[in-house]
Image (spheres, coloured by chain):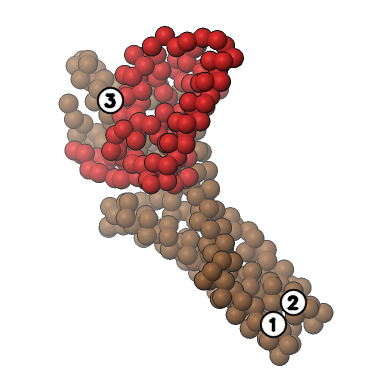
């Protein structure tokens, strides 16, 4: 099942969604679901569009694990659920980024390529 | 542009129609739909609310909200299980370990003093009280005038507790060793406490996050 509406190379992002969400929340005090989707699209220049079917289960899982906590605020005529990192979440971000850094280093060795950014 | 209160209410009814029964999940889905609809209508002034909703809903794929609902129900259940087992673990670490040991000793003494039939009556009464309390607690979700997933408690998910009690009630006799009786009494009591604590924890969390669900 496709979790992402995307160009084929974005399949590589599968499995990294939790890390992406945690990192965004570490850089922003709190975010809501759609805001995360927009930010990811903006940062990847439109390459990666998270679908709701991928995003919300990932957020709910982070909530279950105690890495994020919900905050409900009234916005105009409706309520909005924001997510904010807990102290566990802040530790988890550091851990995940380190793991990802190691992963990238290993892939570079294996594939002998350099990123183009 | 901002959607009106009536349009937001329409979105809640829409999510209900599409099998999102829980208010806590509807709130999040409605906000997502509303934000995307507002964006779409801002970009195309000729787009009606209904057409914008159709377009945005299509973006959820052929399964619509089904996957989100299923995953959320699974997450909530997992979170409950985590809280329950964490409470159980507390009774085997300091300082609650002292309670566990004292309870064991009391059960040990009782098993020497009372005949099996009296011990069975004690368990049967506790079992009935717990089952009634859980049934009433389930009804308490209706205190919230909106149904909350985080309050929807399924007692059968604490199957360990119920099977243990049933085993004791139906098989306890004078052939049971004091050790077996004491161990199972401790296990049953700790599970009972964990169940009550879990319910109180989820209720408190629900009242903090969704106070509007508890007003008439």
Tell me the CA gap for discs 3 and 2: 65 Å
Res. B67 visible in picture:
yes
Q: Which residue lies under the disc numbered 1? A: B108
Checking the image for residue B37, the label placed there is 3
**Quadrant of residue B17 in the image?**
top left
Query: For the point 61% across and 76% down, which residue is it?
Result: B101
Residue B144, quarter of picture: bottom left
Q: Colour of chain B?
A: brown
Q: Earlier in the sequence, mark 3 or mark 2?
A: 3
Direction from residue B172 to residue B23 in the image, left or right: left
Q: Position of residue A67 (x, y in %)?
A: 42, 43
Tell if the residue under mark 3 belongs to the same chain as the one under mark 2: yes
Where residue B207 sits in the image (x, y, percent)? 33, 57
Q: Quadrant of residue A111?
A: top right
Q: Earlier in the sequence, mark 1 or mark 3?
A: 3
- Of B98 and B201, the residue lying toward us: B98
Is B197 positioned to the left or the right of B176 in the image? left
Circle 2 SS class: helix
**Disc ID at residue A37:** none
Establish whether labels 1 and 2 are both on one chain: yes
Question: Does B84 sit above or below residue B118?
Answer: above
- Nearer to us: label 1 or label 3: 1
Residue picked out by circle 2: B179
């Amino acid at each position: 099942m496709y979790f992402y509406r995307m160009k084929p190379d974005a399949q590589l992002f599968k499995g990294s969604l939790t890390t992406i969400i945690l990192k965004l929340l570490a850089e922003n005090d709190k975010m809501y679901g759609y805001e995360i989707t927009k930010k990811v699209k903006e940062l990847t220049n439109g390459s990666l569009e998270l679908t709701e079917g991928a995003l919300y289960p990932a957020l709910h899982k982070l909530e279950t694990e105690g890495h994020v906590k919900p905050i409900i605020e009234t916005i105009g005529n409706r309520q909005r659920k924001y997510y904010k990192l807990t102290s566990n979440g802040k530790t988890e971000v550091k851990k995940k980024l380190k793991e990802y850094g190691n992963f990238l280093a290993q892939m570079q060795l294996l594939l002998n390529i350099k990123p183009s950014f | 542009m901002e959607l009106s209160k009536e349009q937001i209410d329409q979105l809640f009814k829409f999510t209900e129609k599409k099998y999102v029964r829980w208010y806590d999940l509807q709130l999040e889905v409605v906000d997502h739909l509303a934000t995307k609809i507002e964006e779409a209508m801002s970009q195309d002034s000729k787009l009606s609310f209904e057409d914008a909703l159709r377009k945005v809903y299509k973006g959820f794929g052929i399964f619509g909200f089904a996957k989100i609902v299923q995953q959320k129900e699974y997450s909530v259940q997992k979170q409950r299980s985590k809280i329950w087992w964490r409470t159980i673990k507390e009774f085997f670490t300091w300082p609650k370990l002292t309670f566990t040991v004292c309870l064991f000793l009391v059960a040990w003494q009782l098993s020497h003093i009372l005949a099996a039939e009296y011990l069975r009556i004690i368990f049967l009464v506790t079992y009935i009280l717990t089952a009634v309390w859980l049934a009433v607690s389930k009804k308490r979700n209706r205190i919230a005038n909106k149904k909350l997933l985080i309050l929807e408690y399924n007692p059968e998910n604490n199957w360990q507790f119920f099977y243990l009690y049933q085993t004791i009630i139906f098989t306890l006799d004078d052939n049971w060793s004091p050790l077996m009786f004491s161990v199972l009494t401790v296990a049953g009591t700790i599970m009972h406490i964990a169940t009550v604590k879990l319910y109180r924890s989820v209720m408190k969390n629900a009242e903090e996050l969704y106070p509007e669900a508890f007003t008439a």
